[in-house]
Image (tube, grey):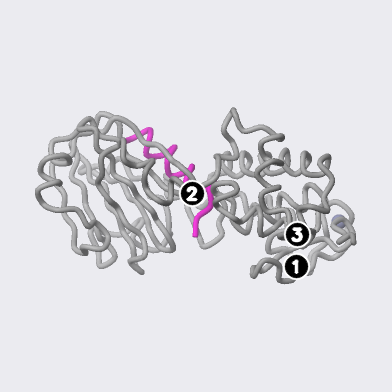
């Protein structure tokens, strides 16, 4: 599952390519991947011009001048590939199998949008992902969008707001609270472990037991790792690649995630792997002490 930085990396790539492109045709082989009716497709998608590309949590939104948007969830194996017809411009994002560089469409292709001199492919081997056309104003009414927490990198999202959100889960472990998408949007296993290591907080510590000053540090660490990961083009976890088909390089900068049996970059103690909030969890046993 991509986390916020991986989807943001896709958004940045598509935002450079898609605006002002006109959608000339659409093809889909699998109704669950693109469930809209032919009537809606003809009325609101064919002939529409793309006005922008946005992201909310881990969901991509392609806005159209028909006041409709394409809502895209990549889920486990979703992938988006942009190819110009002359093959000069190639961009791939998401699950990095051969489809990123191979001939398209292929057997993983679920939806193809024909643009001006280019095509946009939505490939999804395991078919958990989807693309859906809907009125732009209705997006915020989707159950998912109503429940999802604030964007951790939004300018208006402050440390105070962050602490207030975490305190809604006072009795859970801090790791579970960070992973809860209704508390904050877009944080998954990698960025939870990295942020907690940065703030020297044990992932199994209960939220109520952590002093506000430490939570404030956690807020800065979380923003730091997310920004760094976006800058590096996302992580390579689950083999996510960025919009140019390059592997993200954040994992090579990870300080604790997937570094079990390696020395902690801060103190040299061997990093251990355990299970917290049902997830594989990486900690430094010297820097991150569980206090009672
Ligand atoms: Zn350490």
Q: Position of residue 259 (x, y in %)?
A: 73, 63
- For the stretch drawn in magenta, what is the main secondary structure? helix
SS type, badge 1: loop
Say whether disc 2 or disc 3 marks the residue closer to the N-terminus: 2
Neighbor class of circle 1 (other Cα within 10 Å; few <14, some 14-19, many 20+) is some
Q: Quadrant of the C terminus?
A: bottom right
Front-lying residue, 226 or 119: 226
Residue that numbered label 2 is attached to: 147
Q: Is residue 21 magenta?
A: no
Residue that numbered label 1 is attached to: 260
Horizontal side of 164 relative to 96 (left or right) equals: right
SS type, badge 2: helix
Front-lying residue, 146 or 213: 146
Horizontal side of 40 relative to 111 (left or right) equals: left
Q: Position of residue 194 (x, y in %)?
A: 71, 52
Question: What span is colored magenta in the figure?
Answer: 1-17
Residue that numbered label 3 is attached to: 203
Q: Is residue 16 magenta?
A: yes
Q: Residue at x 74, y 69 (%)?
A: 273
Between the C-alphas of marks 1 and 3, the distance is 15 Å
């Amino acid at each position: 599952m991509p986390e916020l930085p991986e989807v943001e990396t896709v958004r940045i790539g598509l935002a450079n390519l898609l605006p002002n492109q006109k959608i000339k045709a659409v093809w889909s082989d699998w109704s669950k991947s693109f469930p809209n009716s032919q009537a809606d497709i003809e009325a609101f998608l064919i002939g529409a011009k793309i006005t922008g590309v946005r992201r909310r949590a881990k969901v991509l939104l392609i806005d159209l001048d028909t006041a409709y948007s394409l809502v895209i969830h990549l889920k486990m194996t979703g992938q988006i590939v942009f190819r110009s017809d002359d093959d000069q411009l190639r961009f791939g994002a998401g699950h990095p199998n051969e489809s990123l560089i191979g001939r398209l469409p292929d057997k993983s292709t679920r939806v193809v949008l024909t643009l001006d001199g280019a095509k946009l492919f939505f490939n999804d081997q395991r078919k958990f992902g989807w693309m859906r056309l809907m009125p732009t104003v209705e997006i915020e009414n989707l159950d998912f969008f109503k429940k999802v927490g604030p964007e951790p990198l939004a300018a208006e999202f402050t440390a105070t707001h962050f602490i207030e959100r975490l305190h809604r889960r006072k009795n859970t472990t801090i790791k579970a609270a960070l992973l809860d998408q209704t508390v904050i949007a877009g944080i998954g296993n990698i960025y939870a472990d990295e942020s907690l290591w940065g703030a020297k907080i044990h992932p199994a510590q209960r939220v109520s037991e952590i002093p506000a000053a430490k939570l404030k540090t956690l807020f800065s660490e979380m923003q730091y790792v997310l920004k760094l990961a976006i800058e590096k083009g996302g992580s390579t976890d689950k083999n996510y690649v960025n919009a140019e088909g390059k592997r993200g390089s954040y994992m090579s900068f990870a300080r604790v995630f997937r570094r079990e049996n390696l020395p902690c970059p801060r103190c040299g103690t061997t990093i251990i792997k355990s299970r917290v909030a049902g997830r594989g969890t990486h900690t430094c046993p010297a820097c991150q002490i569980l206090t009672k």
